[in-house]
Amino acid sequence: MRNKIALTLAAFFVHAAAMAQAVPVGLWKTIDDETKKEKSLVRIVDSGGVLTGRIEKVLDPTAKPDEVCDKCTDERKGKPIVGLMIIRNAGHDAEDKALWTGGDITDPNNGKTYRLRLKPLDGGKQMEVRGYFGPFFRNQTWIRVE
């Protein structure tokens, strides 16, 4: 009986650790879906079950250090790219708890905002980031830094 309980507890903790790694919270390296080049570091945080993400660092060596989001059309217009909140209001998907949806993501290069889906991959080491606009979408694979 003790062995069954020990095995059950061990399985529970292994499963819990795997699920914790699959949560999108942390620092991510963004990879451009067209050029395959590293673009930025984005930190995703959980505020009471709602995920947000800010650009912490721009990795493009040709980018201006004081660049602002001049193409944004909301309150982020004119705000510095570093520190810009690009992911807002994402939460667990109601039907698939492995996904985070319901929020939006903004592309500071064109100022457009898209509906968002985050899908952890490879035990949380990578993440598929999908931005939707109507029936059209774009995917990027981000790599966990920490």
Image (cartoon, rainbow, N blue to C red):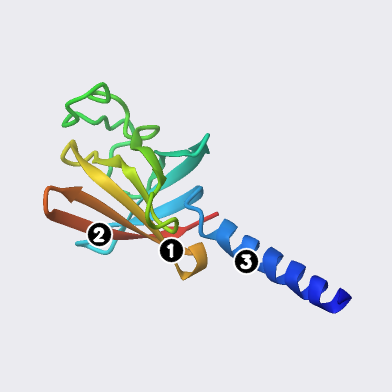
Pinpoint residue 90: horizontal percent, then vertical percent.
38, 42
44 up-or-down from 68: above or below = below
Q: Where does label 3 land, which residue?
A: 15
Q: Where does label 1 land, which residue?
A: 126
Please, what secondary structure does the residue beneath circle 1 have? strand
Q: Residues within 10 Å of mark 1 (few under 14, many from 20)?
A: some
Pinpoint residue 135: horizontal percent, then vertical percent.
11, 53
Question: Does 3 sit left or right of 25 as displayed?
Answer: right
Q: Where does label 2 land, which residue?
A: 139
Pinpoint residue 118: horizontal percent, then vertical percent.
36, 53
Distance (Cα) linking label 1 and label 2? 13 Å
Pinpoint residue 141: horizontal percent, then vertical percent.
34, 62
- Confirm or deny contact between disc 2 and disc 3 (CB under 8 A): no
Residue displayed at 21% across by 43% down? 114
Please, what secondary structure does the residue beneath circle 2 have? strand
Question: Does 109 sit left or right of 95 as displayed?
Answer: left
- Confirm or deny contact between disc 1 and disc 2 (CB under 8 A): no
Q: Amino acid type of disc 2? A: Asn
In the image, 34 versus 23, the foreground residue is 23
104 up-or-down from 142: above or below = above
Q: Amino acid type of disc 1? A: Gln
> Is there any visible trace of residue 62 in the rendered image?
no
105 up-or-down from 28: above or below = above
Residue positioned most to the right: 2
Q: Residues within 10 Å of mark 2 (few under 14, many from 20)?
A: some
Residue 42 tag number: none
Q: Amino acid type of disc 3? A: His
**First reached walking from the N terminus: tag 2 or tag 3:** 3
Residue displayed at 51% across by 59% down? 22
Residue displayed at 52% across by 34% down? 48
Distance (Cα) linking label 1 and label 3? 18 Å
